[in-house]
């Protein structure tokens, strides 16, 4: 309740000052007028009038601030959320990942790309393609834990950070995922396969480097025929890392 009353923008502060001024006027001016006319006889009516006038003003003030705070929270959420899938966007993904980097052992970074997604859009239309992205996002959420991160990285690509997981187990699970998920879409059942790149994010690595390694493994999975997962095991050239960071 009290959180809603805290202004979070210049417009909300202006509204707070303006409505507070109205409240003070509603409380003070009528009472001062009555007391000025006849202070001893009108003290009780002045107080009663001030109370009666303050109740609706306070109600309007609280309602306006609560509505503006609600809109502010909604805008804040929109700034960190992919509007199509409801997953965190890339900026929020980076922030969450960097807030909990690997300290003792490595984390795992996965890059997933829906195979031949353009054919889905060309065959069924972009609305069905959007629906497929939404369904993929819901499935990915079921695979990750609260301590992990998943986001729509861009287009038909998704990124995941898994913490303290067995790499061999994740590779085996990723292979099963890559072979295909079947979704109950509005036009019927659709099966999508995935190319997945897996890389370790070690304590001595920058997050951007781990993402680049996972992306390299992703393209290797595509080169091997798609519908599979590949693990990064080669260093990335320094110039490639610099281009990705820029």
Image (cartoon, rainbow, N blue to C red):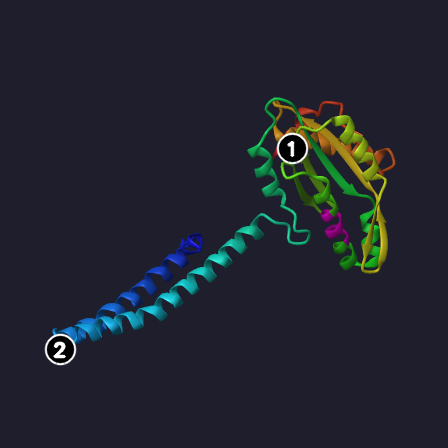
The local secondary structure at tag 2 comes to helix
Left or right, residue 84 beside residue 23: right
Magenta-colored stretch includes residue 133: yes
* Image: 194 above or below 25: above
Q: Quadrant of the N terminus?
A: bottom left
Mark 1: give few (<14), some (14-19) or many (20+) Cα within 10 Å.
few
Q: Position of residue 130 (x, y in %)?
A: 74, 55
Residue placed at 54% from the left, 55% from the top?
A: 74
Q: Quadrant of residue 164?
A: top right
Q: Which residues are magenta?
A: 132-138
Q: Position of residue 177 (x, y in %)?
A: 81, 39
Residue placed at 61% from the left, 22% from the top?
A: 104
Q: Quadrant of the C terminus?
A: top right
* Image: 210 above or below 118: above
Q: Which mark is residue 243?
A: 1
Left or right, residue 163 beside residue 226: left
Tell me which numbered mark, 2 or 1, is placed earlier along the sequence.
Answer: 2
Looking at the picture, tell me which residue is in the foreground, 213 or 170: 170
Q: Position of residue 98 (x, y in %)?
A: 57, 33
Looking at the picture, tell me which residue is in the foreground, 51 or 223: 51
In the image, which is nearer the foreground, mark 2 or mark 1? 2
Magenta-colored stretch includes residue 169: no
The local secondary structure at tag 1 comes to helix
Q: Position of residue 152 (x, y in %)?
A: 68, 45
Q: Which residue is mark 2?
A: 37
């Amino acid at each position: 309740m009290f959180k809603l009353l805290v202004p979070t923008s210049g417009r909300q502060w202006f509204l707070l000052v303006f409505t507070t001024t109205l409240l003070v006027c509603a409380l003070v001016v009528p009472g001062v007028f009555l007391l000025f006319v006849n202070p001893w006889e009108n003290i009780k009516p002045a107080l009663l009038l001030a109370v009666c006038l303050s109740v609706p003003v306070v109600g309007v003030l609280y309602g306006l601030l609560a509505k503006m705070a609600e809109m502010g929270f909604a805008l804040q959420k929109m700034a960190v959320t992919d509007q199509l899938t409801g997953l965190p966007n890339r900026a929020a993904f980076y922030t969450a990942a960097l807030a909990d980097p690997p300290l003792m052992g490595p984390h795992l970074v996965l890059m997933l790309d829906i195979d031949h997604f353009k054919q889905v859009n060309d065959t069924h239309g972009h609305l069905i393609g959007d629906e497929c992205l939404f369904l993929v996002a819901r499935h990915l959420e079921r695979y990750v834990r609260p301590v992990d991160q998943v986001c729509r990285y861009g287009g038909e690509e998704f990124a995941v950070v898994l913490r303290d997981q067995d790499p061999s187990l994740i590779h085996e699970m990723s292979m099963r995922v890559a072979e295909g998920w079947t979704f109950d879409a509005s036009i019927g059942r659709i099966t999508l396969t995935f190319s997945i790149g897996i890389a370790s994010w070690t304590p001595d690595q920058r997050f951007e480097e781990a993402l680049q390694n996972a992306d390299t493994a992703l393209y290797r999975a595509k080169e091997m025929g798609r519908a599979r997962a590949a693990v990064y095991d080669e260093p990335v050239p320094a110039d490639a890392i610099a281009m990705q960071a820029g």
